[in-house]
Image (tube, rainbow, N blue to C red):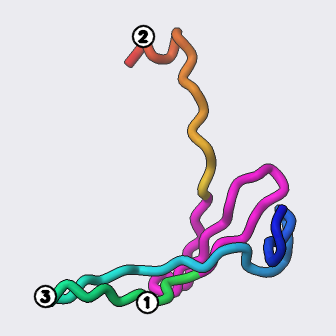
C-alpha cells in the first residue's frame, strides 16, 4: 500500500469520485461527486453527493458457475 492510501475498513475516504463534463470547446471540467470507503472484504462503499440518502456497494464480479450460466 503506497503513501496516502488507507487500509480497507478505514473510517475516512479512500477515493474521491468525480463527474467529468466536456464543454463544446473540448475542455474537461472535473466536479466532485462523492467519496469511496474501502471495506474489510475489499469492496467499496460509495457515497454520492447527488444522492445523499443512498449508499452503493462496489464489488468484484464473481465468475458464474457453469450450472448458472446454462440456466440463463
Q: Which residue is mark 2?
A: 70
Quick check: marks 3 and 2 in contact, CB under 8 Å?
no
Answer with mark 2 or mark 1, whichever residue precedes in sequence.
Answer: 1
Indicate the position of residue 16 as horizontal and vertical percent values. 60, 79
Q: Which residue is mark 3?
A: 24
Kindly identify the residue that appears in the image at 60 percent across and 33 percent down. Answer: 62
Above or below residue 63? Residue 31 is below
Report the side of 6 relative to 45 (left or right).
right
User: Picture quarter containing residue 53?
Assistant: bottom right
Quick check: marks 1 and 3 in contact, CB under 8 Å?
no
Q: Label 3 crowding class (10 Å Cα cut-off): few <14, some 14-19, many 20+?
A: few
Q: Nearer the viewer, mark 3 or mark 2?
A: 3
Residue found farthest to the left: 24
Q: Label 2 crowding class (10 Å Cα cut-off): few <14, some 14-19, many 20+?
A: few
**Magenta-drawn stretch contains 3:** no
Report the side of 24 relative to 38 (left or right).
left
Quadrant of the image containing the C terminus = top left
Given residues 33 and 51, the one toward you in this image is: 33
Report the side of 6 relative to 15 (left or right).
right
Report the side of 24 relative to 46 (left or right).
left
Q: CA distance from mark 3 to mark 2?
A: 47 Å
Helix, strand or loop at label 2? It is: helix
Q: CA distance from mark 2 to mark 1?
A: 43 Å
Helix, strand or loop at label 3? It is: loop
Q: Which residues are magenta?
A: 35-57
Quadrant of the image containing the N terminus = bottom right
Q: Which mark is residue 31?
A: 1
**Magenta-drawn stretch contains 45:** yes
Kindly identify the residue that appears in the image at 52 percent across and 10 percent down. Answer: 67
Helix, strand or loop at label 1? It is: strand
Kindly identify the residue that appears in the image at 70 percent across and 54 percent down. Answer: 43
Above or below residue 9? Residue 26 is below
Amino acid at each position: 500500500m503506497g503513501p496516502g492510501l488507507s487500509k480497507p475498513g478505514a473510517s475516512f475516504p479512500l477515493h474521491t469520485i468525480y463527474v467529468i463534463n466536456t464543454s463544446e470547446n473540448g475542455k474537461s471540467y472535473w466536479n466532485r461527486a462523492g467519496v469511496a470507503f474501502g471495506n474489510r472484504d475489499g469492496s467499496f462503499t460509495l457515497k454520492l453527493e447527488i444522492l445523499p440518502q443512498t449508499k452503493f456497494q462496489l464489488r468484484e464480479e464473481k465468475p458464474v458457475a457453469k450450472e448458472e450460466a446454462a440456466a440463463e
